[in-house]
Amino acid sequence: MPTIEVEQIKEKLKSRIPKAVDVVFKELHTKEKYVESFYIKTISDEAVLHDKLFKPFFEQQHPDEFKNYLESIPQIKSYETEEKAINDFLNGVAILFYQDSVLLFDSKVDRNNSVLDTTVETTIQGPQSGLSESLPTNLGLIRKRYPEPYLNVEGMTVGKISKTEVIILHDTRYADPDTLKRIKDFLSSLDIQMFQTGEQLLDSIKKSNRALFPLMLVTERPDRVAVNLATGKVILLVAGSPFAVVLPTVMKDFMASMADIYQTYWVGRFLQLLRYIGFIISVCLPGLYVATTSYNPEIYRVQLALSIAGSRNAVPYPSFIEVLLMLFMMEMLTEASIRLPKAIGPTATTVGGLILGQAATEAGLVSNIMIIIVSAVAISNFVVPINAFSFSVRVVKYFILASATFFGLVGVVIGFFIFIAYLVKLDSFGEPFLTLVQSTPHKE
């Protein structure tokens, strides 16, 4: 029979366990023994409970024999505190009362443990598998690609209500201890109710320093995680999220794609150069168009200057109004393509863009060359491989456009140098944002 202390623990736990339709209080009896279990059937695996608990209970006659069996199960752990037992219970762990023992049986069901294909960071060559929403599955995928005994795995919980499990990964040979300490202190200082995904950390950093650019890289690729571990990065895995967070992150990480390492050397360098050219075009081209059209048309050849002037002959307002109008239309089309259902999104935005561009040109609202400029800016923006960074680039071009509107070509140059100076000022957990060469890994 259970002792008085066990009965007291049981009554305290019962009083704190919510009364719900999926909460199960189950008692099992034989002539020799008695066990009682509490669990939530919607998040606990009843098949595991049946095979490893209920069935052996009736097969083993002697009470001590069954107790030894329970202690031999890897999923069984001892009761520590009331608070911890309640937290485990609400995450799918079954609480068992047997003789003078209170035990916790890890019977959590994992419904999101399937390995997904990459949908955001797609590559033609290389692995196509992505992370899942299951923390153990993600950790297994990373360990398979990074089979090193120096891989350190630490766990903590974030979120006052959600109590979301977060795993911190780093290679003890390469990770900088000061950076690791900054990251742990940042996670410990988070004051957040519901923590669902690593992307929420972007918002927490943004509130502290108002950075325009993301200072952490969010990835869905296990191979990118393994490569970054080998360079001394710290990886965060969040329970329920199919994305990992890479810290610290610098600009060259945002401009790199996993496709680069699956190409020949010169092809990879060419693709990287192409991205940086696209980045500069996306940021500067609208401002350059306004500056050269309204302030400095003399830099064009005569034929080109006459061609641009002829195409703008019917446009009734200045060039910066024309640019703003088309850029806003392009921004709305881009947002619509993200929000619309996948079945109609590409078709609707393509047809909408073609119709709007043609109609605006024929109505004399914008010039023909403006359609080319806006298309070039949109295509250049999509060359940036990481979406979070490309969204920030979309904002920067308006600052340089405003500078060009007031000061012409000088404004473009000044605006671009202010932009570079801002990037120089940024840092990600102590690592300068414009770092081009990986710092020397820390050695034990």
Image: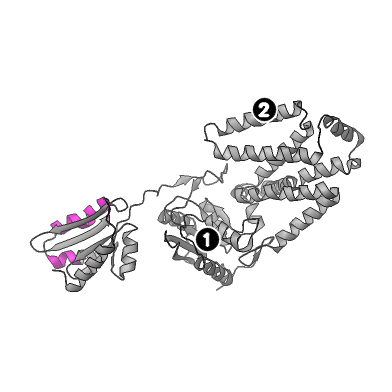
Quarter the C terminus occupies: bottom right
Q: Which residue is mark 1?
A: 235
* Label 2 environment density (alpha carbons within 10 Å; few <14, some 14–19, many ≥20): few
13 lies above or below 259 = below
Does 369 appear in magenta? no
As drawn, is 355 to the left or to the right of 314? left
Q: Position of residue 356 (x, y in %)?
A: 68, 30
Q: Residue at x 76, y 39 (%)?
A: 323
Of 243 and 329, which appears nearest the observer? 329
Q: Which residues are magenta?
A: 40-67
Confirm whether residue 140 shows in the render: yes
Q: Is residue 330 left or right of residue 96?
A: right
Residue 358 x, y percent position in the rendering: 71, 27
Q: Residue 66 lies in magenta, yes or no?
A: yes
- SS for callout 2: helix
Rendered location of residue 365, percent (x, y): 76, 31
Amino acid under disc 1: Ile
Which residue is the site of mark 2?
355
